[in-house]
Image (cartoon, rainbow, N blue to C red):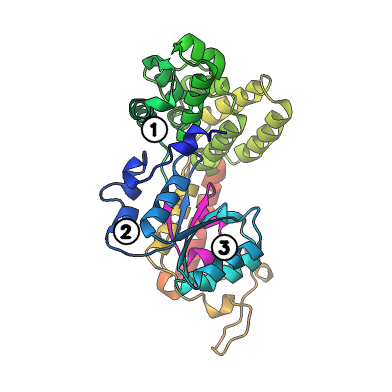
Amino acid sequence: MKKPLAYRLRPQDFDDIVGQDHLVGEQGVIRQMFEKQIPSSLILYGPPGTGKTSIAQVMGLKHGLNTYTFNASTDTKSELKTIISHAKHYRAFVIIDEIHRMKKDIQDFLLPHVEDGTITIVGLTTNNPYHSVNPAIRSRVHIYKLNDIDQADILCFLERILAKNKDCFTSRFHRDVLDYIALYSQNDLRSAINRLELLDNLYPNQEINLSLAEKVLHKPTLHLDKNEDNYYNILSAFQKSIRGSDVDASLHYLARLIAMEDLDSILRRMSVIAYEDIGLANPSVFSKMHAVVDTCRQLGFPEARIPLSAMTIDLALSPKSNAAVASIDAAIKDLDAGHTPKIPNHLINVDNFESKDDYLYPHSYPDHWVNQEYLPTSLRHRQYYQASEVGNYEKALTHRYNEIRKRKKEGL
């Protein structure tokens, strides 16, 4: 039985990989590793169909090592032991799919062999490894994110494989069919190849026009305009319209998102908007948004459009504050700059050999506040929260914030 076209067309070289020049292009970091012969274990993460497995397989070819695959979701520790036993005689390159699902006992067995160079690994995952992969593994690998493959790159790739692999196809495709496939493959190159192959298999030796392709591939109900805005641009325009308090534009982009019927993405983006753009200026939207999420998931489409509309109007016309996101980003920026000094002794529960002041329990003092330091000494004067006074609630928070800072300054 003939293998799927996407499998047969797997890249054999970095030059064959689409849309990941930052990793495998002429100046890409992974290509540079190989050109300078720097063996490194990696984790690659990104959406399906962006080339994670392809890059891993090309790495295996480039390494010139025995290449093994291991699925962390389904394969067992004994299978990994077999790989390691072979690697002790001949260094091995191991592709670990779904690395975020790797069990702790398998990780514990694997780590020393990665550390001493017995094996080189490349882990693959659609999840953000900074959230989903064990820190012990993260500390032993380099982590790289794959980009979404844009519509233009997918179209170019489809044209190229039709030109270079004429023996794989019997059908002839109109240009607008390739545009259509690239547009609705949602940045997934593998999906685009599969759609092309399906049309060729269903209608061999025929001219395939757009009308025929739409019948087979079931064009979504959404009608995109001629500039072919992609899904993520619409989500971005939706958020920016709400942030700009333009309720009519917000409803327009909501309608386009509803037409795509991806309820989870809409709810996720609206939840982000509630906290990022409305925030403390109107904290009542947090509970409202939570209720809308539950309601929409119970209703589904088409009825879910009604609570989505109500919440979009509320978000767009609400007072705005980005104090919450700006404040945490300022704190994270300090961490990224290496500012992680020692926690003050009086905040540490476990006894140590250093002198330790008593922790003062704020609830035992008037107004449930007592003057003591919480930030590490070297960060004592940092001010991450940039107070604003947009809504009544945030005005109250700002008043209390300024009052506390005044009392601390006066030593009260």
Whole-percent x and y of residue 196? 47, 24
How many residues crowd mark 1 within 10 Å: few (<14), some (14–19), many (20+)? some
Q: In the figure, is residue 404 to the left or right of 303? A: left
- What's the CA distance linking mark 1 and mark 3? 31 Å
Residue 315 in the image: above or below residue 175:
below
Kindly identify the residue that appears in the image at 55 percent across and 23 percent down: 260
Q: Which amino acid lies under the numbered mark 3 shown in the image of this protein?
A: Asn
Between 391 and 204, the one lying in front of the other is 204
Q: Is residue 369 visible?
A: no
The residues bearing labels 2 and 1 have C-alpha atoms spaced at a distance of 26 Å
Tell me which amino acid carries mark 2.
Answer: Phe
**Label 2, on which residue?**
34
Please tell me whether mark 2 sits on a helix, a strand or a loop. helix
Q: State the separation of the CA atoms marked 2 and 3.
A: 26 Å
The residue at the point 48 percent across, 41 percent down is 321
Residue 164 percent coordinates (x, y):
33, 29
Question: Given this view, does label 2 or label 1 mark the residue nearer the observer?
Answer: 2
Identify the mark nearer the N-term, 2 or 3: 2
Image depth: mark 2 or mark 3 in front: 2
Q: Which mark is on residue 334? A: none
Which residues fall within the magenta stretch?
121-145
Taking the magenta stretch, the answer to whether it contains residue 367 is: no
| Mark 3 lies on residue | 134
Please say whether residue 154 is visible from this viewpoint.
yes
Q: Secondary structure at mark 3?
A: loop
* Tags 2 and 1 touching, CB below 8 Å: no
Query: In this orientation, which residue lies closer to the viewer: 28 or 385?
Result: 28
Q: Position of residue 269 (x, y in %)?
A: 54, 36
Q: Amino acid at mark 1?
A: Asp
